[in-house]
Image: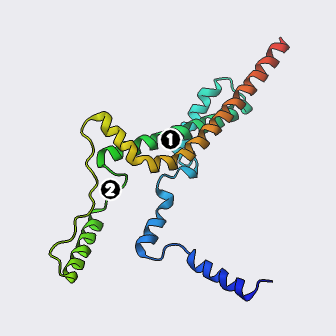
Amino acid sequence: MATERQIAANRRNARRSTGPRSAAGRKRSSRNSLRHGLAAGVATTAERLNHVEQLARKIAGANADVVRLGNARTLARAAFELAQIRRVKVTLISRVATFGAFETPDASETAALHFKQLLRCIKRGELAPPNRAEIPAMPATDPERTAEAIRRALPELIKLDRYERRAAVRRARALRSFLEWKIRNTTYDHALR
């Protein structure tokens, strides 16, 4: 049985852990799952399913039985997921190289922010809002530009690393399973001859 003190502490903790309360915070957190969608799995659309199936049939070969095709599907799914994660990383780096930042500010939000800053300055009696810290310009030459883009994208790339490692392990397991099954059946076929 919980004491009154524990119940009060639980209620305080619950009030603090209900998520963002402001409209901007709720809007930002509502888009969390849409950021990259890598946790959802690979084969979610018909096009992706078709691509994975074609790859599995190429891996399994023309005379594949049900077990071999199943192993090939697992391998194809893992390979496709790993390729998808790597495409996301490349896209992220190229976006940062192009825009100088991962997220480009929305024009309407930027205008509203400048207007609010101007109103605050007028209330304080200042003539102009203080200069915001601008994003430094990207280097002009390609090797430096790419290096700077990777440096700026590094926090997001680190987040994607977990997904990439998980997909690489899944692909390695699937490949090992596929090869073990293939070796086992090849040995068995030679023994029958």
Residue at image location 70% in from the left, 86% down from the top: 5
Residue at image location 26% in from the left, 41% down from the top: 139
Q: Nearer the viewer, mark 2 or mark 1?
A: 2
Farthest bottom residue in view: 4
Residue neighbourhood size for the residue with mark 1, other residues' Cα within 10 Å, grouped as few (<14), some (14–19), many (≥20): some
Name the quarter where the N terminus is drawn: bottom right
Q: Amino acid at mark 1?
A: Gln
Vertical comparison of 188 with 70: above or below: above
Which numbered disc flags the more N-terminal residue, 2 or 1?
Answer: 1
Query: x and y percent of residue 167 in the render?
Result: 60, 41
Residue 84: assigned label: 1
Query: x and y percent of residue 16 in the render?
Result: 56, 77
- Residue 80 in view, yes or no: yes
Q: Amino acid at mark 2?
A: Thr
Residue at image location 32% in from the left, 56% down from the top: 104
Residue 104: assigned label: 2
Residue neighbourhood size for the residue with mark 2, other residues' Cα within 10 Å, grouped as few (<14), some (14–19), many (≥20): few
